[in-house]
Image: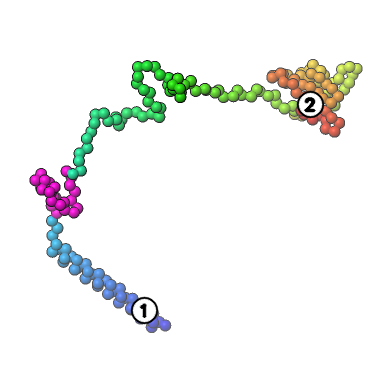
Amino acid sequence: MVEMEKRATNIRRLILAAALAATLLAVAWLEENDADIEETVQPVLPTRSAASSARTKKSAPGLLQVEQLGQRKFSADADDIFAATSWEPKRPLTGSAQSPFGSGQDGRTAPPPVVTSPPPPPPPAAPPLQFKYVGRLTEGKIIRVFLSMAEKNYIAKVGERIEANYRVDRIKDDVIEFTYLPLGVKQTLLITNNNPGKFQ
């Protein structure tokens, strides 16, 4: 096994040495041939007589006949390449006053486009009622209700204000009516046996 590995290594070395020798021989041969070749590059400039004679003869392949290309003509009426550009259409330059909106199919001046304003914002709304009905107390014709809101308890009768924002307007068996004073909006608090203090 060791003998076979040594033989394989020796064969690889021989192959590499032969490849290196062939490369060195090729480089030496190219250097000798390059020394014999002299490159002379001279520009070819056609003269007028050569150009006129070239017109009569067939042009050699690979040569460009510049005179046959033609010359570019510049006009003073050409657009100004530095002028400002716009997406708006150009208005005609006539003495008569014309509408900027153009004319209709029958030749009459078209009316200006209708500009619609955005819809008005919705009217301000009162915040939802946060009161919870706790109970009531009746003394003759005066009815007082017990309410709670945000861990505060209130006792109020018709016409009284609660925290300067609400006024009690009416107390019935199944509903209490309030007015949200900053906006003058009426709000009601439903009272039922199953669900006392339901908001509306």
- Of circles 1 and 2, the one toward us is 2
Say which residue appears at 85% left-offset and 33% top-offset: 194
Residue 22, given in percent of the width and then of the height, sits at: 24, 72
Q: Which class describes the residues within 10 Å of circle 1: few (<14), some (14-19), or many (20+)?
A: few
Q: 45 or 143, which lies in front? A: 45
Dot 1: element: helix
Q: Quadrant of residue 150?
A: top right
The amino acid on which the numbered mark 1 sits, given as a three-letter code, is Ala
Residue range in magenta is 41-67
Q: Which class describes the residues within 10 Å of circle 2: few (<14), some (14-19), or many (20+)?
A: many
- Above or below, 58 relative to 28: above
For mark 1, what is the residue? 8
Residue 189: mark? 2
Say which residue appears at 20% left-offset and 39% top-offset: 71
Residue 138, given in percent of the width and then of the height, sits at: 89, 21
- Above or below, 95 relative to 81: above
